[in-house]
Image (cartoon, rainbow, N blue to C red):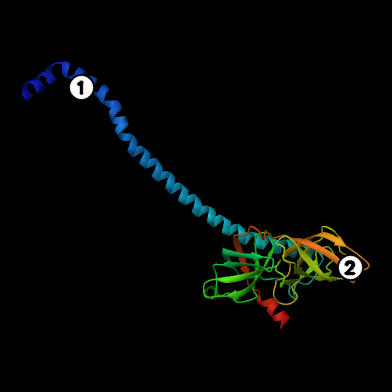
Amino acid sequence: MSAILIVGDKYTEGGTNVRTSLNTLVSPLIYVANIPYEIFSFGAKSLHTRDQLLTENEALKKKQMLQSEQLQQYQFLSRENQKLRALLGSSAKTSNRKIIAQVLSVHSNPYSHQVVINRGATNGLSESQAVIDDMGLVGQLTKVGSTTSRVLLMTDTTHATPVRILRNDVRTVVEGVGKINVVKLSHVPHSLDVRLGDVLVTSGLGGIFPEGYPVAVVTEINRDEGQPFAQIYAEPIAQLDRIRLLVVLWRNQQEQVSDD
C-alpha cells in the first residue's frame, strides 16, 4: 500500500493537492501550538529588559548623586572665584572623598530625627562625618557600626549647623526644632542683615561640615523688639522627608590642615 502511494505521489498531482490541503488545515494548529513558546519567549525577554533597566536606573541614580554633590560645590566655588577670595589658603581646592549610602530605616518623632544607612566602619566611616543628598545638607553621622550607621538629621533638636548667608557672608548657626521641614537661626540680633529668601550654606566652621553646601532658605522673620533676639526660621533645602540615597563626605586634607 505504501509503495502504491509513493508511486502515485511521484507520477500524479493528486498527492500534491492532498498535501496542500492538509497543510492548509494543519497550519492554524501549528500557530496555536507555537503560542505558549512565543508567550514564554516574550515574557523572558521582557523580564530581562526590565532587570536591565532597573540596574541601569540604579546606576544612573548613583551617578546623579555624585554629580549633584559636585554641582553644589561648583556653585559655591564659582561665587568665591568671582569675589577673588583665596580658597582655604590655596590656589585650588581638592575634591572631597565621598561614598553613596542607602537609607535602611527611618526613626522620626518630635524628639528625634534619625535614619539608618547601609554603610559603616568597614567602609571607612566615622562619627561626625557630613551627610548630604542631591539637594543639600542632611545631617551628620552620630553612631557608626561595622556595616550600618545612624545619621542625625539637621532638624533634630540636638543638631546645630554653622552656616553663612550666601548673599552677604554673615555667619550664624541653624538649629533643629523637631519639625522635619523647619529649622531655626539661633541667637540672631535684631540688626542682623537677613532677608526672606536668603540661602544659607555651610560655613565650614567647627570642622564638621565642608564649606559651601546648601542648607536652608529663610522663610520667616519676626523682629519683636520685646524679645532679646529675632525669631528667624528657614526651610531645609534637602528633601528630608523622602530621602533614599545619601552621600557621606570626608573632609579634604587642606581643610584638616587649616583647622589644625
Image x and y of residue 90, in percent: 73, 74
The answer to whether residue 29 is seen in the rendering is: yes
Q: Secondary structure at mark 1?
A: helix
Q: CA distance from mark 2 to mark 1?
A: 98 Å
Residue type, numbered disc 2: Leu
The label nearer to you, 2 versus 1, is 2
Callout 2: few (<14), some (14-19), or many (20+) C-alpha neighbours within 10 Å? few
Relative to 143, 42 lies left or right: left
Quadrant in which residue 12 is drawn: top left
Relative to 49, 28 lies left or right: left
Q: Nearer the viewer, residue 103 or 129?
A: 103
Image x and y of residue 10, in percent: 13, 20
Image x and y of residue 60, in percent: 56, 55
Specify which label sits upstream in the sequence, 2 or 1.
1
Residue type, numbered disc 1: Arg
Q: On the image, numbered disc 2 is attached to which residue?
A: 192
Q: Nearer the viewer, residue 5 or 181?
A: 181
Against 23, is 54 above or below? below
Q: Report the number of discs.
A: 2
Q: Secondary structure at mark 2?
A: loop
The answer to whether residue 95 is seen in the rendering is: no
Which image quarter is the C terminus in?
bottom right
Image x and y of residue 102, in percent: 56, 63
Quadrant in which residue 116 is drawn: bottom right
Against 19, is 224 above or below? below
Question: Residue at position x 19%, y 19% from top?
Answer: 18
Relative to 116, 219 lies left or right: right
Instruction: Name the disc covering residue 19, or none.
Output: 1
